[in-house]
Image: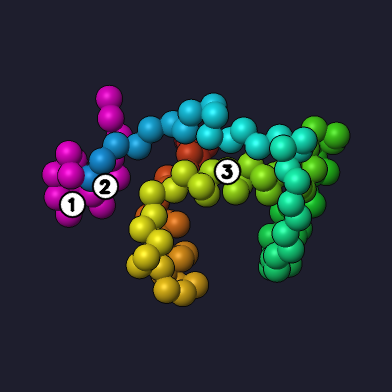
Amino acid sequence: MSRVSYQAILEGSAAEAGQFVELPKSAVATRRKDARKEVRLRVSDEQRRWLAEVAEISGRGIDEDALMRALLDVGMHLQIDWTFVSGGKELRESVREAIRVRRDQVD
């Protein structure tokens, strides 16, 4: 069964909206030994706390660099027309429109 967003159904046919599929295993594949470049970026206090929390609760499983590599790998697969992204607002909207997240079911 293909999954489409409710917005896509309201705005047009499901066929026009496309289909949401899982990323292949190869989509999130950048390993530490493949990472040869460093980048610096600014993050909010909330983002910094989240990175630190994930690294802490995973124990030695992952560090902040590994998490950022995985998130960049995912971002590379977003279906975004970058020619229409002219600023932060458009970027945030484009990313929100390009992804769906799975949430735990609430009983």
The answer to whether residue 106 is seen in the rendering is no
Mark 3, residue position: 73
Q: Is residue 81 left or right of residue 50?
A: left
User: What amino acid is found at the position of numbered circle 2 in the picture?
Assistant: Tyr
Q: Are marks 2 and 1 in contact (CB under 8 Å)?
A: yes
In the rendered structure, which disc, 2 or 3, sits on the residue that comes first in sequence?
2
Q: Is residue 61 left or right of residue 6?
A: right
Q: Is residue 39 left or right of residue 59?
A: left
Q: Which mark is residue 6?
A: 2
Alpha carbons under labels 2 and 1: distance apart: 6 Å
| Magenta residues (range) | 1-16
| Helix, strand or loop at mark 2 | helix
Question: Quick one: label 2, few (<14), some, or many (20+) residues within 10 Å?
Answer: few
Q: Residue lying farthest front? A: 36
User: What amino acid is found at the position of numbered circle 1 in the picture?
Assistant: Leu
Q: Residue lying farthest left? A: 13
Question: Quick one: label 1, few (<14), some, or many (20+) residues within 10 Å?
Answer: few
Picture layout, residue 15 above or below residue 43: above
Mark 1, residue position: 10
The answer to whether residue 10 is seen in the rendering is yes
In the rendered structure, which disc, 3 or 1, sits on the residue that comes first in sequence?
1
Q: Are marks 2 and 3 in contact (CB under 8 Å)?
A: no
Q: How is the image coloured?
A: rainbow
Tell me which residue sits at (54%, 43%) in the image: 74
Q: Position of residue 18 (x, y in %)?
A: 26, 41
